[in-house]
Amino acid sequence: MFELVVDMDSSEGSGKVILLRGEIDIYSAPDFKDNLFQAMGDCREDIVLDCSELGYIDSMGLGIMVAALKRARQNDRNIRIRNPRTNVKKLFKITGLDKVFIMEELK
Amino acid sequence: MKPLDTVSVLIPSKAEYVSIVRLTASGIANRMGFDIDEIEDIKVSISEAISRMIDKGISSDSIRIDFHLYGDFIRIDFRLSGSSTRDIFESEEDGFAFEIIRALMDEVNLDTDDHVLLSMTKKLERAV
């Protein structure tokens, strides 16, 4: 099961916070892509992907994040990956994407 | 070398069944004594492999996954029914998946013998 929630309370200027919940795999990837791109809108601010409740992601999910990052950068915006779990962080490291995205740990 | 036990799973070549194989793998690896991190490695690798096969539509019918349990390692073989073998990691994008599998598993072999498209091994590192 996968769910994407846009945090409407995220403060102005600090980026739009999008909470990812559940598992992103080949089954939920199309859903993730549609919802993420819709939530990004016209990229007027930075995007924060809150991964604290993301239990699983595969290469397809990572590919979608890269596509989203390209789109954000075309608008001089960035995507930050917030609080990924150890297993998710490991995949960012293996693929070198931890150097491409801004990784942040917030308490 | 003959495995102590073999568990086989046959799934339709559809995205919604990948998570079921992940759960099965998790149960088997846990029973063998792999730790949480290693179980996660196995789950991710299996998932990546099956996703590539489904994404490419190279199996029109089903995918068979054989879990061969040995004393100190597990070997997982992937077989396809009703299709000729093809390289499942041919495109640049697939390289991502292959990179992940190679990093997480101890041994990865492509196209090993008749109908085994991919074979991967993970060793059991027992605490001394």
Image (cartoon, coloured by chain):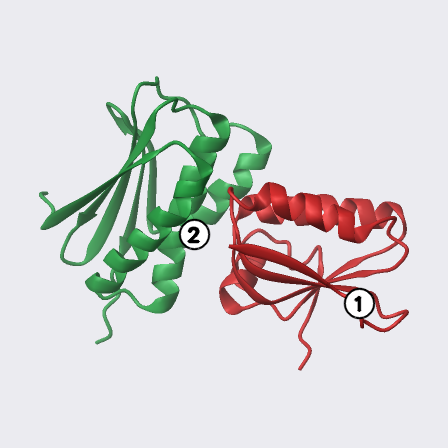
Give the left or right position of residue A95, taking residue B53 as reference.
right
A85 with respect to B78 (left or right): right
Name above or below for residue A72 compared with residue A49.
above
Q: Nearer the viewer, residue A32 or A15?
A: A32
Residue A23 visible within the image:
yes
Q: Nearer the viewer, residue A27 or B109?
A: A27
Q: In which quarter of the image is residue B124?
A: bottom left
In the displayed structure, does residue A10 sit left or right of residue A51? right
Residue type indicated by callout 2: Val
Residue B93 percent across, percent down from the top left: 58, 36
In the rendered structure, the residue with mark 1 lies on which chain?
A: A
Q: In which quarter of the image is the N terminus of chain B?
A: top left
Q: From the image, tell me which residue sits under label 1.
A: A8
Residue B49 appears in view = no
* Lateral position of residue A30 relative to residue B118, left or right: right
Packing grade of label 2 (10 A; few <14, some 14-19, many >=20) is many
Residue pictured at 51% horizontal, 42% vertical: A26
Q: In which quarter of the image is residue B61?
A: top left
Task: Give the labeled residue for mark 2.
Answer: B44
Q: Chain B is drawn in which colour?
A: green
What element does badge 2 sit on?
helix
Q: Residue at x 83, y 49 (%)?
A: A41
In the depicted structure, whether residue B10 falls above or below residue A91 = above
Tag shown at residue A75: none
Give the structural element (helix, strand or loop) at label 1: loop
Q: The red chain is which one?
A: A
Quarter of the image with the C terminus of chain B in it: bottom left
